[in-house]
Image (cartoon, helix red, strand yellow):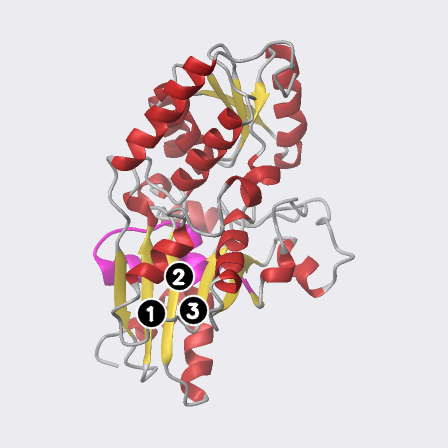
Amino acid sequence: MDRTPAAARIDRRWLAEAVRRIEADYNRSADTHLIRLPLPRCPGVTLYLKDESSHPTGSLKHRLARSLFLYALCNEWIGPDTVVIEASSGSTAVSEAYFARMLGLRFIAVVPAQTAAPKLDAIRFHGGEIHAVDDPRTVYDAAHRLARETGGHYMDQFTYAERATDWRGNNNIAQSIFAQMAHEEHPVPAWVVCGAGTGGTSATIGRFIRYQRHTTRLCVADPVASVFHRHFADPAVIALPDGCASRVEGIGRPRLEPSFIPSIVDRMIAVEDAASLGAMRALSEALGRSVGGSTGTNLQACATIATEMAAAGEQGSIVTLLCDGGDRYACTYYDDAWCAGHGIAWQPAAAAMRAFLDPRG
């Protein structure tokens, strides 16, 4: 089953202790850093990176996993003997495995077979089990089936991401960004740029911007081989044709997910995989540490917006997300042989981004 029957109520003492453990873990964690990157080639425009790689499980998905667990607990969908199941390309499963182990629960991650090996190792490190599927489009059905077979709960990040987080505030990522920007030269960003995997982060940020009555606009950076930007342009498009898939893990989807809310997005920019990985490599050199592929996607969109702002004589700040570190992709995105084998010529994009980020202008 996917839900706890009403007749099988969860012990409120266990629920209270589970919530306490998750909240205590949050209180032990500092906020993530905001890294300032001046852009000499775009006078008056400053780029900021919200570094989500510093979470205990190393990615932006730590926030989502915490919210999903609290949402499921407070709905009494999870009890002391519940098997927790998630469909994930890796990072959400890593974070959910962390919280499942904290609560003493069995966790099974349904992942595409091509998921980077270090992500799978991280899931196992936190006590999670792996159920791999060859076709990424079947992760949903496989997760539902496992939930039925185990009597467990399918977390379903793709449905609940947009509602599990309180978009009005309560220490969400949008509130954190605007609080950290308060003393900067341009405290209200002209743009916030993020990717979409579930759509939960873009929904939280977009709603918060409107709730706080900010003039900030929201841009979603999306892999070319993703349905989100196509649906944004044409609402009739809800799925990709067979064989169309992005190599950038964590963002972009082959089908329209319930948590993606296009009405609160102001602009979408489609980014080629080679451009994402080239930007990833260039930014890693500029920071002196490696970042993941989705951060490269975000950076490409930021470069487009910053260049347009400079050309129009506009000044302001752009905030984007450093989603995770690059160590999880050492055997894929940072492996030249792997990139060549998948036909990803990242070098021209890396050279262009190096020039864009050059502090000498």
Determine whether 298 is above or below 201 in the image: below
Q: Do the residues labelled 2 and 1 touch (CB within 8 Å)?
A: yes
Element under disc 2: strand
Relative depth, front residue between 68 and 50:
68
Element under disc 3: helix
Amino acid under disc 1: Leu
The image position of residue 112, as x and y in percent, is 55, 33
Q: Do the residues labelled 3 and 1 touch (CB within 8 Å)?
A: yes
Element under disc 1: strand
Amino acid under disc 2: Thr
Q: Can residue 281 be seen in this view?
A: no
Residue position marked by numbered label 2 in the rendering: 320
Q: Residue 47 carries which label?
A: 1
Residue 50: name its quadrant.
bottom left
**In the rendered structure, which disc, 2 or 1, sits on the residue that comes first in sequence?**
1
**In the rendered structure, which disc, 3 or 1, sits on the residue that comes first in sequence?**
1
